[in-house]
Amino acid sequence: MKWTLEGYTLRLKRTFRLFGYSKDVVPVGIVRLREANIEAYGEVSPLSITGETLEQTQRVLRELQNREYPALLFHDQFSEFLRQTFPQLPSTRAALDMACLDWLGKKWGLPLYQLLGVNPEYAPPTSFTIGIDEPEVITEKVQEATPFPVLKVKLGTSYDQRIIETIRQLTDKPLRVDANEAWTKEEAVEKIDWLATQNVELVEQPLPIGHLEDVAWLRERISLPLFADEDVMDSSDVLRLQGIYDGINIKLMKCGGIHEALRMVHIARALDMKVMIGCMIESSVGITAAAHLAPLADYVDLDGNLLIDNDPFVGVSIEEGRLVLSGDPGLGVRPRTAHAE
Ligand code: MG
C-alpha cells in the first residue's frame, strides 16, 4: 500500500474576504492511495484554527508506511484508528478517510452514496457564497450567482445593512448570513431583528467562539435559527450545543472525515437539531466527498471549488444549484487533464 501527497495552490477567482481576514490563494494537498491496482484520492485543506500544515500531513503518510493499521476494507475501524492516532490533525484525517472510501467504492464498484445508503436526489441545492466586498463587486457576484436558488452572505462589517440592501436591490432569493464570530451579543440582536425582515433563513456563528452563554442569551431574543460553525468541530462538541444553537455546520476538514461527519449527523438528529454540510476552500476532491453526504442535510453550502479557477480535479457538477454526482465508483473524481476541460 502506498500513500503519497501532492501540494497544490488553489487560486481564488476573486479575493475571498470575511471578518478578520482575506485570501487570494489556498494551499491544499491531494493524498493518493495506491493498493491492489486501484488509485484513490483524498484532499487536505489545512485548517488555520488547528494550525495544521501539509508538512504534518506528509509526516503522517510517512508514519503510515511504517506501521500496522486496520485494513481499508473496514472503513469504520480505519477511521477510528486515525481519530485515535492523529487526534490533532482533522484535515489530514479527512483526506485519508476520503481516500479510503474512494478506494472501497472503486474496489466494490459502487459510488460512495451507495456505500452510505443515501439517495443523491434528496440533496438540497447548495448556496453560493458572497464574501465581504464593495457594493459594485457584490453586485457582480450576485449576478454570477444567478443559477443558485439561495445565497450565503458573509457579514461582520460596519456596513452590514448596506451589503444586504445591495443584494436586495438585485434579488429576493432567500439568504443565509454568516457573521464569522464578528458581532457582540447586543449588536447581534439588533442586526438579526432587521435581517428577519429581509428573507434571511438563518444566521451562522454570530458571536466569538466559546461564548455559549451569550449565544443562549441571544437565542432568547431573536426569531431566526442560529447555526454553529466555529463552535462545532466534531461529534464531541454537538451535545453541549443543544438548546443553544438550532443547527450545526459540519465540514469534513473540521471533523476528520465522512465517518465522523455521520456521527455528527446522528447526534444532531437525536437532539432535534438541524444539519448543514459546509466546506472550506477546497478542490473538487473534498467538495465531491462532502456532496455524497448532502442528502442527509437540511442545508448545503458546498461551493468551495466554484470559487477557484485552477481546480486540479473534476468531480461533482452543479445544475441550477443542485449537486450532480457522476455515479462513478468511489468519490467519482478524476484529475483534470490538460485536454479534457
Ligand atoms: Mg461559517
Image (cartoon, grey):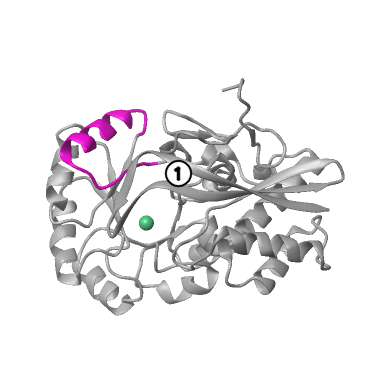
Could you say where residue 28 lies in the image, as x and y percent from the top left?
Answer: 54, 50
> Is residue 161 one of those drawn in magenta?
no
| Residue situated furthest bottom in the rendering | 213
Decide if ligand 1 comes within 8 Å of the CB at mark 1. no
Magenta residues (range): 127-148
Above or below, 155 against 288 in this view is: below
Left or right, 26 with respect to 131, comes to right
Where on the image, by quarter, is ligand 1?
bottom left
Q: Position of residue 283 (x, y in %)?
A: 53, 42
Residue 141 visible in the picture: yes
Image side of residue 138 versus residue 306, left or right: left
Question: Where residue 203 sits in the image (x, y, percent)?
Answer: 29, 57
Which image quarter: residue 126? top left
* Residue lying at 55% horizontally and 48% vertically, measured from the top left: 290
Classify 251 as above or below 63: above
Quarter holding residue 93: bottom right
Q: Secondary structure at mark 1?
A: helix
Whether residue 77 appears in this view of the structure is no
Furthest-top residue in this view: 339
> Is residue 177 left or right of 77 when viewed as pictured?
left
Q: Which residue is mark 1?
A: 304
Q: Residues within 10 Å of mark 1 (few under 14, many from 20)?
A: some
The answer to which of 57 and 204 lies nearer the viewer is: 57
Q: Amino acid at mark 1?
A: Gly
Task: Tell me which residue sits at (41%, 72%) in the image.
Answer: 242
Judging depth in this view, the residue of 8 and 180 nearest the camera is 8
- Of all residues shown, which one is farthest toward the right? 36
Residue 161, horizontal then vertical, whole percent: 13, 50
Q: Residue at x 29, y 65 (%)?
A: 181
Q: Image point 15% across, 66% down: which residue?
A: 187
- For this rendering, which residue is in front, 221 or 187? 187
For the C terminus, the image quarter is top right
